[in-house]
Image (cartoon, rainbow, N blue to C red):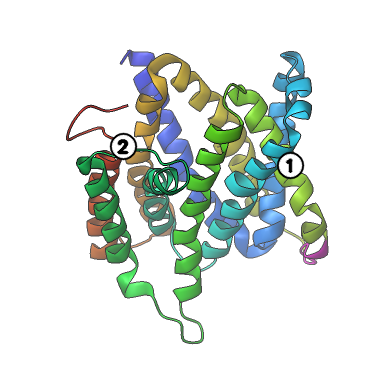
Amino acid sequence: MRRRDLLDLLLLAAVWGGSFLFMRLAVGEFGPVALIELRVGLAALFLLPAALWRGRLPVIAKHWKAILVVGTLNAALPFLLYAYAAQSLGAGFLSVANAVTPVWGAVVGWLWLKDRLPWSRSLGLAIGLLGIVVLVWDKLDFQAGGTGPAVLAAVSAPVFYGIAANWTKRFLTGVDALSNATGSMLAATLLLLPLALATWPQAPVSAMAWGATILLAVVCTGAAYIVFFRLIANVGPTGAVSVTFLVPVFGVVWGAWFLDEAMTASILVGAGIILVGTALALGLVGGKHR
């Protein structure tokens, strides 16, 4: 991997790890729906000029039905679940829960598209799911004021990412990444707009919350896509997806540094188990990878 690609990988991991920090900072004032509407809406505005410049709007229009599903499964629903969870769970916890995304992608591909998995990758799926159990074990409190519902939201979000990845493989193969990204952000914006207007915060929102929201949308969503596309072009999908292993590191560090979040044993042990399982599930260790 070239030095520039390595720097892109580290930058992307730091930015995506920071997305959970920014959600924590902004969701208390905006609420989950308004925050995510701003996230996808501003990201769409950021990506749209590039899509116009490269003539991608006809591509988006041609595949609008499939892209609408991707916008729902890959942006609107998981972003909402994470924002809801961020009201009571730390950025470090959320970033570790997100790391299991490739595991769910493999599970859905196996169940839906009948992708064949060697034993090492099947073992990785089981290990990754075990890591989730370790991560959430001490937080499944469903009494009044407990974090149980937020935990379920956080661990459910990656399932939608896994479905979206396989939907894209099934129905959007050959459609370029910029069209997918721009179209999905536009779709998510339109889907969430009525609910966001109905739940828009009545009290004035602080400059800090607005700043965190703008960074979440422009840097962690719009600009991050551009870096990710460049990584895929330069090092391939497998190399690009290795960012999964670095995002929890930055997520935990940012949460501890800026929000004084504790690095609990369940987070550290769960993260280790999840990352080992993800490495096996992706085929990065234990045999030939794709």
Q: Which mark is residue 86?
A: none
Give the residue displayed 36% in from the left and 27% down from the top: 238
The part of the chain drawn in magenta is 198-203
The rendered magenta stretch, by its main secondary structure, is classed as loop
Quadrant of image for the C terminus: top left
Q: Which residue is mark 1?
A: 187
Give percent across and percent down for residue 9.
39, 27
**Residue, x 56% and y 40% (percent of image)?**
167
Q: In terms of secondary structure, where does tag 2 sit?
A: loop
Residue, disc 2: 282
* Left or right of 42, for residue 268: left
Picture layout, residue 11 above or below residue 246: above
Residue 200 included in the magenta stretch of the image: yes
Label 2 crowd bin: few (<14), some (14–19), many (20+), radius 10 Å: many
Q: Nearer the viewer, residue 23 or 276?
A: 276
Q: Which of pointers 2 and 1 lies earlier in the amino acid sequence?
A: 1
Q: At label 2, which amino acid type do we have?
A: Leu
Residue 189 on image: x %, y %: 74, 45
Q: Position of residue 208 (x, y in %)?
A: 63, 52
Q: Is residue 130 above or below residue 230?
A: below
Residue 50 visible to the viewer: yes
Q: Residue at x 63, y 32 (%)?
A: 181
